Amino acid sequence: MQVGKVLGDATNGALYNIGNNELWVSFDYGTSWEFRENYPGYTKFFSGVNQGLIFKGNSQGFFKSIDYAQSFELLPITVTCPFTEVGFFEPEFYGIYGEAGIYFNFVHTIDYGQTYSEIPIDSAVAFWAPGGHYPQISRGTESGEIYLVSWWLDSNYKIFHSVDKGYTWTEKYESDYINIYYWRVNYTAGREPGSFYVMRSRINPAGDHVWLYIDYSSDYGETFTTYFHDLDSTITKVNPVKKIEVNLSNYPNPFTEKTIIEFELPENCTNPLLNIYNIHGILVKQFNITGKKSQQWDGTGFNGIKMPGGIYLYSISNRNISSQLNKLLFNN
């Protein structure tokens, strides 16, 4: 089993793990897991309304299971609502959609997404999506109670809480810096009032285990207690890989015509990619930097046309290395 997105069931101790196109279920708070199915890509799962009830949606339709994902039934509906979370009774769902750096809206449906209403989200609550980390929501334990986790350009996340179906939000927590290319971060509300979980996983320095940190809050996300689990690679199917931190710099910064991004890669580094993102976290340029120590960027995007002036972010991605998001200023 590969550690992926974790969903809670209405049954105490029951969890679903979704990762690597595999669905697993646990009935003992994640101590042991049972395989359920392989699912096609672009499948979304939703759980937590009733015990054993889990939904999934993909290009084949919208499906429902009432037996902890042992079998699924195709529902005769057409979903038009971009929902991402179950509500507090079976046809109710919540969602969030939008474009990073421009807007995000909160949506609500009570008929499986066939019709829905939407509410604009204040830009101080959700606005960015660095590295593709879009805002996510998770329902609480009371009707209308929603948590929202949003990522920001300093590579940290904030937790917000609403008790009126997303009309108003209260900030509860702001994390420290997290290297989003080094850590996998998931979150979900618990099934007890005020409970919230943040799950952070990474490969250990030796490269043969997965370290899983579970941050638990009982006060609506204001404070957390951390629990650590060392998962054996034979369980998590992790190939032994040691991540090496690579430092990046560029000059000149700011620049107008071109800038040189410098780095020092480890030996035998396979297909390292230098990624450049705009301020909204959208990838605008990518270079294969195999065997290089520097890379020139002239401010153009994939189409060869000059990008608008402003702040851009860059990092290196590879299964063996990691780097922080660095900032540069392009004066066009």
Image (spheres, rainbow, N blue to C red):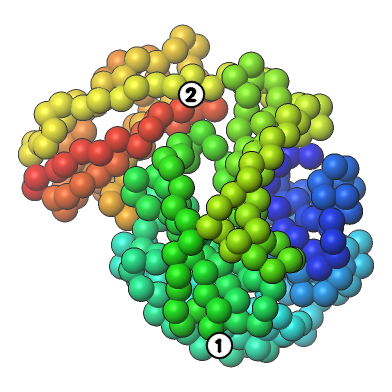
Is 269 positioned to the left or the right of 99 in the image?
right
* Label 1 vs 2, first from the N-terminus: 1
Residue 51: image quadrant is bottom right
Say what secondary structure mark 2 lies in: strand
Task: Look at the picture and state if 171 lies above or below 203.
Answer: below
Residue flagged by tag 2: what amino acid is it?
Ile
User: In what quadrant of the picture does the N terminus appear?
Assistant: top right
> Between 191 and 185, which is closer to the camera in this rendering?
191
Residue 166 drawn at (x, y percent): 50, 79
At horizontal 44% and vertical 22% (from top left) the residue drawn is: 245
Q: Position of residue 5 (x, y in %)?
A: 67, 51
Image x and y of residue 38, in percent: 80, 51
Q: Quadrant of residue 102?
A: bottom left
Residue pictured at 16% horizontal, 30% vertical:
259
Q: Is residue 123 visible?
A: yes
Question: 61 left or right of 170?
Answer: right
- Residue at x-position 59% and y-position 49%: 224
Q: Residue furthest top?
A: 267
Residue 250 circle label: none
CA neighbours of label 1 inside 10 A, class few (<14), some (14 to 19), many (20+): some
Q: Residues within 10 Å of mark 2 (few under 14, many from 20)?
A: many
Q: Residue 17 vs residue 79: left or right?
A: right
Residue type (three-letter) at the residue carrying disc 1: Tyr
Q: Label 1, label 2: how many angstroms apart (C-alpha)?
A: 43 Å
Q: Which residue is mark 1?
A: 116
Q: Is residue 132 left or right of residue 8?
A: left
Residue designated by label 2? 321
